[in-house]
Image (tube, helix red, strand yellow):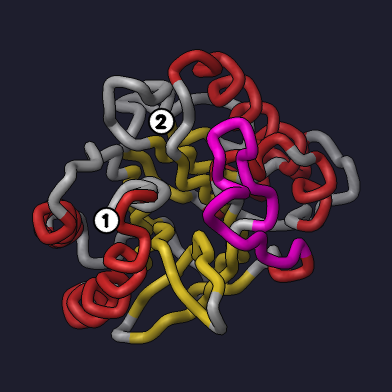
């Protein structure tokens, strides 16, 4: 039976030094409870690094090895720049127990920010739930939060993680959409934006009732809360 678990959003800054970013992520990760579900921002290890793209992609396997060695029984979700068959992708990872449990590449690129000039889009079919200790989990990467069809693909998830680098100019969109996703899918949403001057400042953990946790970056996943909402308002999602 699924039990209550700590939920942590690591809203970290993205610095220019890849090694420093990795050290910060590991330090914060190790400070979380050993059974926590932890979400870090989009491309938190390197930023978008368009001026040193190949270097950023080459750093990802190094970082994965280090993170797999220290994640323990926690679940860690984040995205990183990857390279495969001549193409670069923005790939989401879910790590636990020294293993990669799930990957998916960003399918909807933010063309306003020039992502399409550098990344290859992943397949929308790859945006599917995975299960961790009885919890059905989905991931949407930043701009993908705007696509209603993807909400439907993740319908029935207990938790949806949204690692992001969301622009400050559209901060209220991130706030509104992440809350609406929790309400529509009657699930927990962990919206984790980077903590940079040009980012939204709207990272939050939102319950299936649409309530934002206080403090905003720490809460608990409670199966009874999930079931209560789905029994309270029956919209076709199984409790």
Mark 1 closeness class: few <14, some 14–19, many ≥20 residues within 10 Å: many
Residue at the location (28% across, 31% down)?
Answer: 195
Q: Between residues 129 and 215, which one lies in front from this camera angle?
A: 129
Which residue is at 56% across, 58% downward?
119
Residue at the image position 35 percent from the left and 28 percent from the top:
216
Q: Is residue 29 left or right of residue 204?
A: left
- Looking at the image, is mark 1 or mark 2 earlier in the sequence? 1
Q: Which mark is residue 203?
A: 2
Q: Secondary structure at mark 2?
A: loop
Relative vertical location of residue 23 with respect to residue 218 in this rendering, above or below: below
Label 1 sits on residue: 45
- Residue range in magenta is 107-124
Task: Label 1: state its secondary structure.
Answer: loop
Q: Please report the residue visible at 38 percent of the width from the left and 25 percent of the height from the top.
A: 199
Frontmost residue, 60 versus 98:
60
Left or right of 158 in this view: 68 = left
Q: Position of residue 222 (x, y in %)?
A: 49, 49
Residue 27: horizontal and vertical position, in percent? 10, 56
- Pick whichever, 51 or 182, lies toward us: 51
Tell me residue 65's x, y (percent): 24, 82
Q: Name the front one of labels 1 and 2.
A: 1
Residue 123 covered by magenta stretch: yes
């Amino acid at each position: 039976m699924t039990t209550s678990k700590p939920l942590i959003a690591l809203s970290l800054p993205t610095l220019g030094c890849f090694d420093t970013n990795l050290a910060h992520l590991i330090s914060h990760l190790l400070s979380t409870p050993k059974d926590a579900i932890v979400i870090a921002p989009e491309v938190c290890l390197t930023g978008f690094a368009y001026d040193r793209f190949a270097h950023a992609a080459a750093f990802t396997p190094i970082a994965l090895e280090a993170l797999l060695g220290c994640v323990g029984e926690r679940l860690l979700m984040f995205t990183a720049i990857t390279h495969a068959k001549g193409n670069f992708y923005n790939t989401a990872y879910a790590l636990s127990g020294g293993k990669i449990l799930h990957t998916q590449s960003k399918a909807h690129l933010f063309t306003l920010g020039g992502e399409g000039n550098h990344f290859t889009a992943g397949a929308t079919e790859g945006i599917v739930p995975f299960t961790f200790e009885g919890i059905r989990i989905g991931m949407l990467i930043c701009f993908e939060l705007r696509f209603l069809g993807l909400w439907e693909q993740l319908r029935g998830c207990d938790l949806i993680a949204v690692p992001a680098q969301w622009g400050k100019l559209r901060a209220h969109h991130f706030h509104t959409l992440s809350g609406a996703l929790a309400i529509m899918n009657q699930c927990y949403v962990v919206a984790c934006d980077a903590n940079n001057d040009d980012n939204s400042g709207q990272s939050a953990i939102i319950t299936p009732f649409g309530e934002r946790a206080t403090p905003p970056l720490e809460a608990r996943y409670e199966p009874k809360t999930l079931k209560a909402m789905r029994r309270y308002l029956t919209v076709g999602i199984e409790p």
